[in-house]
């Protein structure tokens, strides 16, 4: 990967984490409220699901930030994003007045999954811990 591609890859990683890192930190700050929301969605074992969600969003973001295990982390986050889209933005089951927003958020998740899958395929580029490890 040349410098131009690596720079765009780094910028892309930074942009992707702007979705996940604030969401994960927000869930930590509002743990009880988020737990209630997870329970209202009918998510089984909501405490466990919330902790896993926080770990994926926060630690996954930090891993993407520094380019650590990028391919695996991006793949895990893509699967997580699919689960979040289906459980949190089920527009097909939303009340009529909420369909538009739920559908918009669902397809936003689909697009983010696309970016994560490209990242899983391409790797982190030169500006990453992965690249430094491979160079050794």
Image: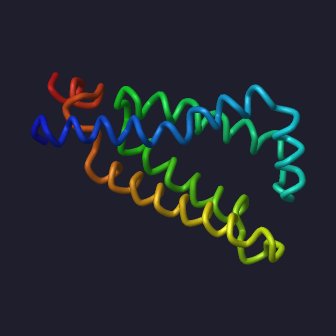
Quadrant assignment for the N terminus: top left
Q: Quadrant of residue 87?
A: bottom right
* Along the line of sight, the residue nearer the viewer: 136 or 111: 111
Residue at image x 73%, y 72%?
99
> Which residue is located at x 19 percent, y 32 percent?
126
Task: Residue at 62% x, 60% y: name it.
Answer: 105
- Residue 12: x and y, percent? 34, 42
| Image: 105 above or below 7 | below
Image location (x, y in percent) of residue 53: 67, 41
**Is 76 situated left or right of 50 in this image?**
left
Q: Which colouring convention does the figure follow?
A: rainbow
Return the residue nearer the eye: 16 or 116: 16
Q: In this view, does 82 lie to the left or right of 91?
A: left
Foreground pick, 87 / 101: 101
Outermost front residue: 97
Quadrant assignment for the C terminus: top left
Q: Residue at x 22, y 24 (%)?
A: 132
């Amino acid at each position: 990967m040349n410098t131009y591609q690596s720079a765009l890859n780094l910028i892309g990683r930074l942009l992707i984490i702007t979705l996940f890192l604030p969401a994960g930190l927000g869930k930590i700050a509002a743990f009880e409220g988020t737990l209630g929301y997870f329970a209202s969605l009918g998510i089984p074992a909501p405490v466990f699901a919330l902790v896993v969600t926080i770990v994926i969003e926060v630690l996954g973001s930090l891993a993407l930030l520094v380019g650590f295990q990028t391919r695996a982390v991006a793949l895990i986050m893509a699967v997580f994003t699919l689960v979040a889209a289906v459980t949190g933005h089920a527009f097909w089951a939303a009340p009529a007045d909420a369909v538009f927003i739920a559908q918009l958020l669902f397809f936003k998740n689909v697009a983010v999954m696309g970016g994560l899958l490209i990242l899983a395929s391409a790797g982190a580029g030169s500006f990453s811990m992965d690249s430094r490890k491979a160079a050794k």
